[in-house]
Amino acid sequence: MSPKTLYDKIWDAHVAHEAEDGTTLLYIDRHLVHEVTSPQAFEGLRMAGRKVRAPEKTIAVPDHNVPTTAGREDPAQMTEESRIQVQALDTNAKEFGVHYYPVTDVRQGIVHIVGPEQGWTLPGMTVVCGDSHTATHGAFGALAHGIGTSEVEHVLATQTLIQKKSKNMKVEITGKLMPGVTAKDITLAVIGETGTGGGTGYVIEYCGEAIRDLSMEGRMTVCNMAIEGGARAGLIAPDETTFEYVKGRPHAPKAGQFEQALDYWKTLFTDEGAHFDKVVTLKGEDIQPVVTWGTSPEDVLPITGVVPSPEDFEGGKVEAARRSIEYMGLTPGQKLTDIEIDTVFIGSCTNGRIEDFRAVAEVVKGKKIKDGMRAMIVPGSGLVRAQAEEEGLADIFKEAGFEWRLAGCSMCLAMNPDQLSEGERCAATSNRNFEGRQGYKGRTHLVSPAMAAAAALTGKLTDIRDLI
Amino acid sequence: MEKFQKLQGVAAPMPLVNIDTDMIIPKVFLKSIQRTGFGVNLFDEMRYDRQGNEIADFVLNKPQYRKAEILVAGDNFGCGSSREHAPWAIADFGIKCVVSTSFADIFFNNCFKNGILPIVLPQEQVDILMEDAERGENARMTVDLESQEITTSDGQVISFEVDAFKKHCLLEGLDDIGLTMAKEASIDAFEAKAGAARPWV
């Protein structure tokens, strides 16, 4: 048998039907659902008199719209439209009998943090959600990607997705990371290298020593942004770190069955000699703490760099860069560390997990954020919040001057009340720096949690290596 | 779904690269639980000022492009979010075909579910169409899905590729779910087999 990649193996194990032209019905093991991209899908089922085929494999949680301030159970805290969406999810979850974590449940949080935390996401699975950051779950060696609402309806009705196979791409990060360099810097550096369209048509497998050395939290950060590189999904082969994380989670296989699952999971790796259609290799030692200067996640530079000039680019990117620099209110040649920050946002499905908060606490412990700085930390789930409180991190944050919020997507996409105002500049641990993403005319610089913490202290984009 | 067979209409040029889903439909408009009504907010932040007045030099506000049915766009169109509100807004505005050198994967798939034909062409051919689109209301292109050809306003013919299954569904206006449910026996069989092999799933 010819050698297979990890992606090939997971794909092959989920083909329910294949047509002659390669159009495949791919079976879906886990379907995650949130309030923004699902109402029209449930409505479609209702209109056609269809049921959810596998409600036991379907998990719903509100995250995009929910306020992250105390007292949010009060519907008056939401706008009319947000309330309708959250209530629609509530009604649909109950009517169709899917697993559901309402806002009042301590397990509620960002869907991509809740899934792994509850053990819904397991190695070798197929996982989809009407959200592009579903790529996150690839950290477990699960084939996970975002889908549109029509596909959400298709999966609800049939537990399958109509797919054509993507190509295989390998992204290898060799060696060790230098101090101050994190998973976020890896994933941004890769996008800086490949561009936001570089992964289009591919499923990426991340590998190499620097990836193996990452915790599950770090691996989730890396895979989360595979979509920002245009890839359908990002994958990391499961290993002892994965198995250790999964073991004992509420929906992970229990004793006896766990051993059987483990035997299978240990087969989930790319065979020696398997073919990749594209290979990108970065040396871990070469990756520096990075920051985005523009309005595309590919606009990445080491923190030691300067704002580029449109003429540094070619083709359509010249105009895009000119537009970005103007939108961001920057001057070519300006040092990135001279850029002053108004707001710091720490959270999101990219960096809203416990390890991210430990990294922040390490930087801000016993210190105060800059006068006038707005800084908020939004846990990815109620359980992350509880753990951070138990570890004393929340006290460190509050003493430093951060707002300590309840779980949700919050200012990553600013669908809830957490938004930037016009011209406001934010260092954010989230995943997109698009125009208007965090609020109309808001300006976003993507960074790691430690770099966001450093910016909160100094009031500028800051090289974390100067503080450690 | 509405069928897509042959379209003759005005093409609007949007040469900017990396036009993302937040540009196509900003999140403040994602709160509807309907599939329609998004067209008025298509490209909202580029199209209107803060007071809701049209920005005159935005392409779709120009008289010659107000009824555009084809968009010729820069590379990596539709990157970002999986929100189907993006193709819903495009379709609701009246655009039925988008041409670019590349599309983001999820957006590309979402188009086909909504009767929109996304066409990928090499840079040189997109350049020809972009130039044609810049002729304003005279830029009436013809997109023929059956023959897989675009004809420019001056009669140049450009062929394009499209996945056979997706083409079939668009031509006939077929509903994916109905097609898949006809294969229910395969899904049942797969579930039985996979359930035995991986009972923990």
Image (cartoon, helix red, strand yellow):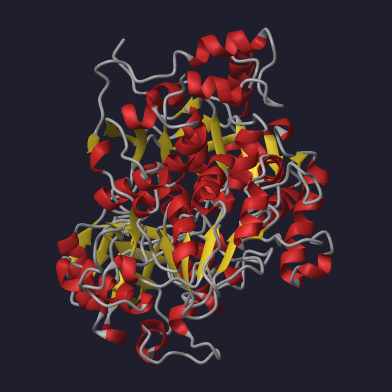
* Quadrant holding the N terminus of chain A: top left
**What residue appears at the point 44 percent right and 13 percent down from the top-left corner?**
A267
Judge from the rendering whether residue A464 lies leftward or rightward of residue A54; answer left or right.
Answer: left
**What residue appears at the point 55 percent right and 45 percent down from the top-left corner?**
B176
**What residue appears at the point 46 percent right and 42 percent down from the top-left corner?**
A221
How far across and down, in percent of the image, does residue A294 sit? 34, 67
How far across and down, in percent of the image, does residue A205 sit? 36, 32
How far across and down, in percent of the image, does residue A114 sit? 65, 40
Judge from the rendering whether residue B114 lies leftward or rightward of residue A158; answer left or right.
Answer: left
Q: Residue B17: name its quadrant.
A: bottom left
**Can I make out residue A143 in this image?**
no
**What residue appears at the point 67 percent right and 61 percent down from the top-left corner?**
A65
**Can I make out residue A89 in this image?**
yes
How far across and down, in percent of the image, does residue B69 sit? 40, 74
Quick check: B136 above or below A103?
below
Q: Residue A319: name its quadrant.
A: bottom left
Q: Nearer the viewer, residue A117 or A200?
A: A117
Quick check: A364 above or below A246?
below
